[in-house]
Image: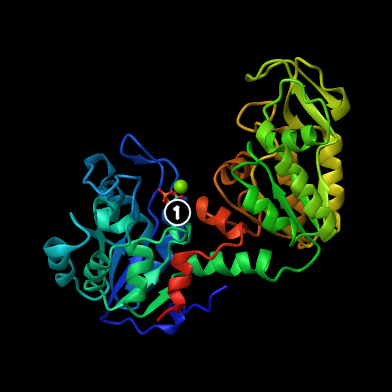
Amino acid sequence: MSNFRTLDDLTVKGKRVLVRADLNVPVADGKVTDATRIERQAPTIRELAEKGARVIVLSHFDRPKGKVVPSMSLKVLVEPLSNAVGRKVAFADDCIGPTAEKAVAALKDGDVLLLENTRFHKGEEENDPAMAKQLAALGDIFVNDAFSAAHRAHASTEGVARLLPNAAGRSMQAELEHLQKALGNPERPLMAVVGGAKVSTKIALLENLVKRVETLVIGGAMANTFLAAEGTNIGKSLYEPDHLETARKVVHMANEAGAVILLPTDVVVAKEFKQGAAHRTVPVAQIGADEMVLDVGSDSIKAFANRLLTTRTLVWNGPFGAFETAPFDKGTVAAAQKVAQLTREGKLLSVAGGGDTVAALAHAGVEDDFTYVSTAGGAFLEWLEGKELPGVEALTAK
Ligand code: 3PG
Ligand code: MG
């Protein structure tokens, strides 16, 4: 991991500080439906403002693809951001050029300004040096607080970081410190839970993790592909016939590395996939030809819980079953609650992240009981793949 600076290393009074946030939050009918990212990034903005900086907030929102798309304006976030930061937030209709420059020039110490969606300009995703230069002209210091956008080498994440003195914001700092504890330099034994639908989207991740953990737990429909690869009849279950070989390779790599792979030994099956569908729990050898696997069974959860007792560090990505459709959420909920309990008891360091995972933990009511839950989707996955994230790498460059 890079050796980054933090807010503690900066003198910001009277300085124009550009803060790259990730305000790409879910919005429906003009209202934010999950403010987690805003809440996580508010402390950095507040701290800088309290220290007398002139804070200029940059973010992308959705994927407007280099054009102005009014429905993707950041304007709807002025009020939620202002509430979270506890200060008035000004807004400028453009993130570069005369409009932005004028708004920045009007700032006094302690003021906060939000600039319009960086992705309204083509130069953002192209990491155009000219756009990075225009962004850099707005500030004296660059602070990146957007771990969840750090896998993108864009002008506002990577390009601008190379042009200004820089540091990680508090949220970025927390993400990096926890990921370091979880995977960089973990207390062992280390366990990874990888769930979700597809092996194909997680090949690099599985291949990286299997070399680094003592235990790899496979959940979700992905486990069906592993079961099928072992010759288990999985009936009508969702799986990836093109990735049986991938699954075998991961198992082989685990054997070579001395890691244990935990696959379900019993499963919850149903003939149709719908809320409340008739279902039964069977050993994996007894899945009917007309049945599909929708969750892990209680024996599998017991085996997982047992193994957890001798585990010190856990990294979790992806659910065990179709948790959005009851009763197929039981395995995921039971597993998450076990992790939460051991974490509360101080026996386990637990870090979760990536897409569906946060929703699954929230559904289990334990998102505050893990040691750390990342707000990142793709960036968290790329981290688990062992990739360097350009937005993080650039923080050490200057
Ligand atoms: C995210 O929501 O994962 C980040 O904000 C990155 O967004 P993107 O996938 O559109 O680059
Ligand atoms: Mg994404």
Question: Quick check: is the Cβ at mark 1 less than 8 Å away from ligand 1?
Answer: no
Q: How is the image coloured?
A: rainbow
Q: Nearer the viewer, residue 27 or 387?
A: 387
Rendered view: 62 above or below 237: below
Q: Give the total of numbered labels.
A: 1
Q: Is residue 240 visible?
A: no
Q: Position of residue 271 (x, y in %)?
A: 72, 15
What amino acid is found at the position of numbered circle 1 in the picture? Arg
Q: Position of residue 38 (x, y in %)?
A: 41, 55
Identify the image quadrant of the C terminus. bottom left
Q: Quickly name the residue at label 1.
A: 37
Say left or right for 308 vs 194: right
Rendered view: 302 above or below 45: above
Say left or right for 269 vs 175: right
Q: Position of residue 164 (x, y in %)?
A: 32, 78
Residue at 64%, 48% (x, y): give it. Answer: 203
Q: Say what secondary structure mark 1 lies in.
A: helix
Q: Is residue 221 visible?
A: yes
Displayed quadrant of residue 382: bottom right
Q: Residues within 10 Å of mark 1 (few under 14, many from 20)?
A: many
Q: Nearer the viewer, residue 131 or 166?
A: 131
Displayed quadrant of residue 146: bottom left
Q: Position of residue 73 (x, y in %)?
A: 25, 46
Say left or right for 398 vs 216: left
Say left or right for 73 vs 247: left
Residue at 34%, 45% (x, y): give it. Answer: 63
Residue at 47%, 57% (x, y): give it. Answer: 148
Identify the image quadrant of the N terminus. bottom right
